[in-house]
Amino acid sequence: MAKVALLIDNDFEDMEALYPYYRLQEAGHTVIVIGPEHATYRSKHGYPLRSDKTPSEVSIDEFKALIIPGGQAPDRMRTKPEMVGLVKKAFEKNLVVGSICHGAQMLIEANTLKGRRATCYISVKTDLINAGAMYLDSSVVIDGNLVTSREPKDLPDFGKTLIQMLAS
């Protein structure tokens, strides 16, 4: 089964990190939580998730997918070049990249959206368009290796799509 990177920082949206974390494990994949440093990160509602690795401790070549949950974590992560670098490398290596809600802020920072179809939380829509993407208001949008969703209610479609893409 595949090895999947899950990016994390404080104030992540609980469901958008924990649902893929457990759902992908349930499907037999290994999920490695990557944070800016070795720490226990707190979700918006206080749930903890400890990083397994930092960006300097991994090679993108060991992964088949990279997941970016939403919440306020992407706004924090996009100020950290090592975290943004992982997203850039994931696209260079054509990994499956999943982003939900505010996770699109990392895609924007990594300059990966020009000419792509994508979705995100409504408050990030204008930024996504300004980054050169075509915004679609859909529970899940697939464009090549990129899988995007809008918000927690889209998690069933997001999770199912990620698992299907990892199976191919």
Image (cartoon, helix red, strand yellow):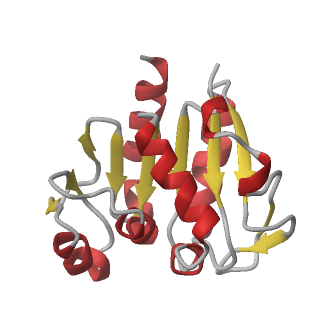
In the picture shown, does residue 33 fall above or below 163?
below
Residue 53 at least partly seen: yes
Q: Is residue 54 left or right of residue 8?
A: right
Residue 32 quadrant: top right
Count of residue discs: 0
Spot occupied by residue 92 in the image (x, y as percentages of width and height): 42, 40
Q: Is residue 12 left or right of residue 123?
A: right
* Residue that appears at 80% across and 58% down: 51
In the picture shown, does residue 52 fall above or below 26?
below
Q: Nearer the viewer, residue 28 or 6?
A: 6
Residue 153 quadrant: bottom left
Q: Nearer the viewer, residue 136 or 60?
A: 60
Spot occupied by residue 77 in the image (x, y as percentages of width and height): 59, 73
Q: Is residue 67 left or right of residue 38?
A: left
Spot occupied by residue 50 in the image (x, y as percentages of width and height): 83, 61
Spot occupied by residue 128 in the image (x, y as percentages of width and height): 24, 70
* Residue that appears at 40% across and 67% down: 101
Indicate the quadrant containing the C terminus: top left, top right, bottom left or bottom right.
Answer: top left
Indicate the quadrant containing the N terminus: top left, top right, bottom left or bottom right.
Answer: top right
* Residue that appears at 61% across and 32% down: 61
* Residue that appears at 41% across and 34% down: 94
Residue 15 at least partly seen: no
